[in-house]
Image (spheres, grey):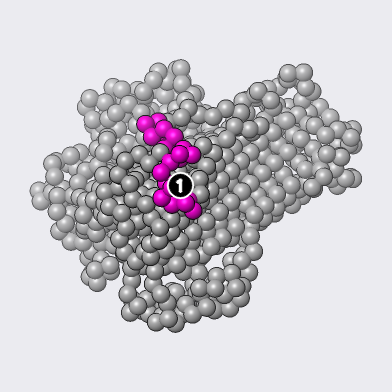
């Protein structure tokens, strides 16, 4: 549709523009000027070039419908508003606006598989159920590639039906296969084993005999540790010996770094397209094979094509994106880089191939009241501020529901990944992830009033919150959060808060931990670090409340002399000088190993019905251990606020009430309804 108003000056005093791709001159009583977001953006640029923004700024109302994007909707410094005249792009009231990085495939393009060579590769029971479509007929020619080995998910085309990511053909269909025995681990530096050999293992059963006709086979596995997954192409299969040799070394080697069995799945195999809801893309032939779980004639069928973010904002300021559904893309949904005061509000982000929303640098950006789900890797990745000067980013991540992340990368892809300095994370619901929920680097973050649950459900040796390996990263406060129902059934250890490999200088205040520790850890666990303060918290039915595995001085001296830590502590920042020695006085003698008291402090905590209380280098003061309900508002309903008559206030007179009823999502103008309580 051509713009109905050709001259920008004709609406110089108008503060509202309207976009629709419906080919109707009016929608819901509004005159439509533009058919694309880019047209409205360019009109505002022209308006700014001919004068100033109208008082109160400009709002672009985008009307209902799906807007497929073959390239990013890009905004930059030319698209900035001001404090008094901001620019907003908003979904029209009560209208569903979908920005998608996918192309729809007509159902009529799908037909039965007639190629006999392909039919022989398919499972006999599935042959007559699998359909095929030519992607090139829909102008889809870029599908992405699987490298020989990868931890981070590659950007590849995916198949979606009725808004749901379909399953890349795999074996087994549910759960994991287990390695029978390790024949050759390959190099294992963690146990000082050097080798040029590729990993070889023995498998059970004879399923892999079906893969002999496949051009390539990839195995995704927890090859050594249950906190590290990698996908590696198969080099060779010896069906007589039942041996598989990988085509690339795994950097930890194959073997049991953690006590659970080593597990793997086979991915991206036409031969395993044997269950409804699975698909396979033949990249050489440009074909998609699909085993339907519903009649295709009644389904919305789509393939993701957009590698760059759907919305890409660079160095813009005073700009709002509000109310859109952003979905089905190979890359991220939104990236904000540089600039200031960019607000992503009340959006639904789903079915991304990689991240949900990325904030890179800049200041005063916010993500508010968004639903972020079914994400390929990390839900929100945010950084900003200046660690050298400890200047805050002032970024805010508030009132978001972030769940079912890490769909394509089972470890080291999080609900939240934070870096830099001074990010405020509050009132979010953060749940359902196979590995860790919040991983941070940097300084002086504030994480409060969040409801965090069902985290670490497929991994081990992990925490819902994690940081480590850089003692210059200090000053983060975790307060008034509810951590519950965390961890898998594996034996090594899981926790709510994990200060790993020397992490110190953080405060844990006023949290509630319920069933938040497993294995040999504690709900709060410190590995090597010191100077952490755990104060005024409640621990309920945890295997252990607080645990620690301290490092001796000799080990600290070794680490402090390592080039990696020298870079982190003295070059990236300098912890021996202001502002670090002023903000964190405990750092003044930090590089002098023998002068440090290696303790963490635990003050005024309540421990209720936990199997174990505390171990490790915790200096404990005024803790209260209780074997029955100490006066919760309603323990049966999991309301762990304390009544005014709780015995806690008598035994620990200094214990400050925890505002349990304020934790989690809030109803407000942006989030008009709350999801049902789980």
Number of callouts: 1
Quadrant into which the C terminus falls: top left
Q: At 29% from the left edge and 38% from the top edge, which residue is drawn? A: 170
Residue 377: in sight, yes or no? no
From this viewpoint, which residue is outermost toward the front?
650
Residue 412 drawn at (x, y percent): 41, 53
Residue 477: in sight, yes or no? yes
Dividing the picture into quarters, in which one does residue 223 lie?
bottom left
Q: At 89% from the left edge and 36% from the top edge, which residue is drawn? A: 12
Residue 80 drawn at (x, y percent): 76, 48
Q: At 57% from the left edge and 39% from the top edge, which residue is drawn? A: 399
Residue 561 drawn at (x, y percent): 41, 80
Choose between 416 and 576: the one closer to the eye.
576
Residue 42 drawn at (x, y percent): 77, 41
Q: Where 610 falls versus 132 (above or below)?
A: below
Q: Where 10 falls versus 245 (above or below)?
A: above
Q: Is residue 450 left or right of residue 543?
A: right
Q: Where 546 falls versus 160 (above or below)?
A: below
Callout 1: few (<14), some (14-19), or many (20+) C-alpha neighbours within 10 Å?
some
Is residue 99 highlighted in magenta?
A: no
Choose between 671 and 571: the one closer to the eye.
671
Q: Is residue 328 left or right of residue 216?
A: right
* Local SS, label 1: helix
According to the picture, the residue beneath numbered tag 1 turns out to be: 649
Report the span colored magenta: 632-655
Quadrant into which the N terminus falls: top right
Is residue 636 highlighted in magenta?
A: yes
Q: At 30% from the left edge and 44% from the top edge, which residue is drawn? A: 627
From this viewpoint, which residue is outermost toward the left?
240
Dividing the picture into quarters, in which one does residue 14 lie?
top right
């Amino acid at each position: 549709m051509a713009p109905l108003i050709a001259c920008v000056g004709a609406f110089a005093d108008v503060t509202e523009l309207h976009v629709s791709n419906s080919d109707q001159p009016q929608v819901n009583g509004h005159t439509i000027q533009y058919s694309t977001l880019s047209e409205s953006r360019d009109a505002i640029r022209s308006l700014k070039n001919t004068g100033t923004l109208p008082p109160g700024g400009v709002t672009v109302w985008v009307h209902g419908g799906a807007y497929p994007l073959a390239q990013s909707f890009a905004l930059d410094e030319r698209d900035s508003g001001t404090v008094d005249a901001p620019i907003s792009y908003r979904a029209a009231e009560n209208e569903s606006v979908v920005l998608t990085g996918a192309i729809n495939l007509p159902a009529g393009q799908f037909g039965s598989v007639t190629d006999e060579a392909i039919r022989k590769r398919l499972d006999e029971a599935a042959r007559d159920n699998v359909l095929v479509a030519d992607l090139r007929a829909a102008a889809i020619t870029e599908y992405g590639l699987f490298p020989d080995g990868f931890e981070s998910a590659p950007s590849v085309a995916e198949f979606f039906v009725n808004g749901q990511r379909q399953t890349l053909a795999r074996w087994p269909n549910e759960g994991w296969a287990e390695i029978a025995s390790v024949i050759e681990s390959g190099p294992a530096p963690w146990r000082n084993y050097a080798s040029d050999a590729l990993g070889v293992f023995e498998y059970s059963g004879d399923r892999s005999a079906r893969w002999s006709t496949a051009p390539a086979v990839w195995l995704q596995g927890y090859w050594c540790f249950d906190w590290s997954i990698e996908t590696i192409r198969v080099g060779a299969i010896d069906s007589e010996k039942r041996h598989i040799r990988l085509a690339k070394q795994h950097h930890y080697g194959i073997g049991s770094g953690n006590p659970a069995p080593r597990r793997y799945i086979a991915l991206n195999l036409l031969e395993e397209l044997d269950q409804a809801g699975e698909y396979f893309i033949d990249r050489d032939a440009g074909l998609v094979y699909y085993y339907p779980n519903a009649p295709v004639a009644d389904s919305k069928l789509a393939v993701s094509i957009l590698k760059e973010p759907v919305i890409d904002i660079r160095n813009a300021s005073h700009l709002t994106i509000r109310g859109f559904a952003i979905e089905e893309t190979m890359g991220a949904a939104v990236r904000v880089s540089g600039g200031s005061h960019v607000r992503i509000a009340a959006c639904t982000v789903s079915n991304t191939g990689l991240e949900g929303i990325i904030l890179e640098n800049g200041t005063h950006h916010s993500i508010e009241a968004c639903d972020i789900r079914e994400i390929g890797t990390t839900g929100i990745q945010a950084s900003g501020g200046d660690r050298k000067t400890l200047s805050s980013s002032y970024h805010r991540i508030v009132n978001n529901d972030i769940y079912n992340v890490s769909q394509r990368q089972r470890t080291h892809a999080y609900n939240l990944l934070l870096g830099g300095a001074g990010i405020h994370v509050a009132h979010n619901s953060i749940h359902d992830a196979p590995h860790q929920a919040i991983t941070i680097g940097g300084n002086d973050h504030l994480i409060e009033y969040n409801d965090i649950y069902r985290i670490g459900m497929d991994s081990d040796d992990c925490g819902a919150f994690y940081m480590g390996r850089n003692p210059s990263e200090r000053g983060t406060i975790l307060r008034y959060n509810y951590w519950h129902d965390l961890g898998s059934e594996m034996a090594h250890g899981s926790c709510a808060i994990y200060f790993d490999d020397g992490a110190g200088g953080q405060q844990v205040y006023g949290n509630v931990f319920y069933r938040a520790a497993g294995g040999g850890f504690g709900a709060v666990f410190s590995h090597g670090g010191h100077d952490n303060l755990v104060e005024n918290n409640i621990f309920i039915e945890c295997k252990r409340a607080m645990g620690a595995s301290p490092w001796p001085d000799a080990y600290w001296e070794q680490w402090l002399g390592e080039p990696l830590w020298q870079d982190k502590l003295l070059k990236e920042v300098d912890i021996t000088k202001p502002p670090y020695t002023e903000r964190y006085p405990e750092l003044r003698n930090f590089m002098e190993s023998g002068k440090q008291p290696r303790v963490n402090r635990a003050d005024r905590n309540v421990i209720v019905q936990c199997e174990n209380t505390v171990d490790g280098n915790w200096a404990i003061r005024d803790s209260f251990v209780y074997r029955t309900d100490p006066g919760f508002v309603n323990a049966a309903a999991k309301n762990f606020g304390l009544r005014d008559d709780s015995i806690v206030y008598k035994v620990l007179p200094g214990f400050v009430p925890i505002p349990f009823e304020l934790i989690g999502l809030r109803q407000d103008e942006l989030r008009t309804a709350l999801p049902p309580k789980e």
